[in-house]
Image (cartoon, rainbow, N blue to C red):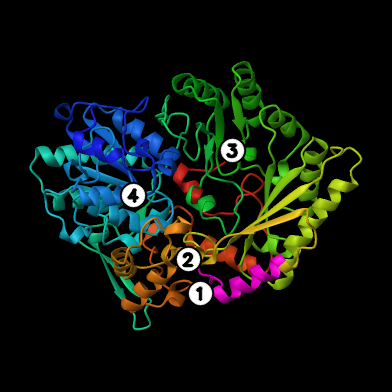
Amino acid sequence: MQIPENIERILTQVQKPARYAGGEVNSVCKNPDEVKIRFAFCFPDTYEVGMSHLGMKILYGLLNERADTWCERVFAPWPDFEELLRREHIPLYALESFSPLSAFDFIGFTLQYELSFTNILNMLELGGIPVKASERSETDPIVIAGGPCACNPEPIADFIDLFVLGEGEEVLGELMDLYLICKENGHSKTEFMKKASQIEGVYVPSLYCVSYQENGTIRSVEPLEGAPAVVHKRILRNMDAAYYPDRFIVPYIETVHDRAILEVMRGCIRGCRFCQAGFLYRPLREKSAGLLCSQGKDLCENTGYEEISLSSLSTSDYSQLAPMLEEMLDFTDHNKINMTLPSLRIDNFSEELLDKIKSVRKSGLTFAPEAGSQRLRDVINKNVREEDVMSSCKIAFEGGYTSVKLYFMLGLPTETMEDIEAIIGLAQRVVNLFYSLPDRPKGRGVNVTVSVSTFVPKPFTPFQWEAQDTMEMIAAKQKHLIESITSKKITCKYHEMHTSVLEGILARGDRRLGNVIYTAWQKGCRLDSWDEHFHFDRWMDAMKECGLSPAFYASRKRSFDEILPWGHLDYGVSKRFLRRECEKAYAAETTPNCREKCAGCGANRLLGGACFG
């Protein structure tokens, strides 16, 4: 489609015009007069980040398979382009048709991380749509949102008309069908929302009334006008029968993940107590090896990509990994296509697996012990022992690797300064292991990179009731971490604490944070996940102006009896199970993985029976 003249003129004035020009290979263009629904899929971050997101690729293809629907893409503009849009009075537009957001029936946001929330407000306003749901008219688009952060939608409930909880492939189709029926029958947007609330997996926040105690905690969440008291997430039961695109849009510029992506499975068997994704995506569902190979070949042939990445929460737990790799490597080797296997487990890394991945990549290997001491690894239910770490590193070193990255978390429940020291102690023992091996690569030194992120308690995990470390505690632990290093063979990196604290506030927030998000946005907050655009002081000013305490949301421990903001939402894992796991954490007692023994989390009912035969 031809770029409008007013847009083409300003594209020459920005740093990366390809972000805003559209027209990429495999993008879908339709005649707007021949479709009944126009859907703008909005990724609330930059083009390079959004175009790397697998969920967007799946839902874009799925919606465009419908003859009655046209799904287009919209991304958050970088400040240089935003300035030009505002100066020239050009509304934010979709890349396929260059239509403004206000021309669409649905505006759909994916919520991948909490620090994208102000981008949502900014994109709505740039697109000519009232930011607050209560201020939209019958003629304004319906604003919907889904993704992992929708598990606690309350902080942005003021801005979203409805949320999709869980996996969206089936729900979106049902919503589109309902919309067409309502449209044909002359029903209002309000009537559509009431009917939509009866679809499993759809949460309409305006149909729930939240009241608060004097101490700021929630008194009750009351459903209105027939809305369900509890909203249950949706899942796909059969991954082999699920839609998966045979082609991706190929960007003209480099993106974060510039490659074909194969989704191996959803869910995880492990039950690490800090890991929100591991609980949100339960139960585990795998694709068959033959289907994966077929999908991988189609993607490479239809995109020209020379790299395939296997996507899952724990790729080495895929039960058909060996036969799938055998077949895939025949194809990738013959066609000179690289294949990457992220998310490898330390405790099932083997020489056989190393031999396979050596043929397709030779960069450093990454493992995630998460904690330095065995006590703390048991607290978080990592179910990895030091001998697993050393065995995996030994295999890697003897296989020719000289670089290993180890991921850890700082600020975990029950953590002490001794646990911080243990992180560096473990890294040092990995360094010593390298030099003790007679079969190590000769003439080369080793580098062990220690990457440390700050723990953020998240909803629907056993640690959802826990307090996050204060900034003073985080700073003291980071200082002690660096001071514990005695070897130049160890490189240590840690995350900026202020973003983690804000993430902690937003992750477990209630509806009152809507005013904070709105105020922070008005103060200029946007692109908060980018260090150069993050202004923690503006967020703290917004909290103060709205009369709310950061400590109340981030560094306060909740009681098991407290009504949590997301308590009326069900992601398949029972509160009783999460509480039991939290209590086991304080006893440093581990829980076996799901294949070894069912822990009774409750997710099996989503499959109508046992998770595993």
The secondary structure that most of the magenta stretch takes on is helix
Q: Which of marks 2 and 3 is in front?
A: 2
Q: Which of 118 and 352 is in front in this view?
A: 118
Q: What element carries label 1?
A: loop
Q: Nearer the viewer, mark 1 or mark 3?
A: 1
Q: Which of marks 4 and 2 is in front?
A: 4
According to the picture, the residue beneath numbered tag 3 turns out to be: 613
Callout 4: few (<14), some (14-19), or many (20+) C-alpha neighbours within 10 Å? few
Q: In this view of the protein, can residue 373 be seen by the observer?
A: no
Residue 180 in the image: above or below residue 119: above
**Labelled pair 2, 1 in contact (Cβ < 8 Å):** yes
Q: Which amino acid does label 4 sit on?
A: Asp
For the magenta stretch, what is the residue range? 465-482
* Residue 125: % across, % down: 23, 54
According to the picture, the residue beneath numbered tag 4 turns out to be: 80
* Residue 608: % across, % down: 46, 43
Question: In the visual, does 466 lie left or right of 317?
Answer: left
Answer with the quarter of the image where residue 93 lies: top left
Q: What residue type is labelled 1?
A: Ser
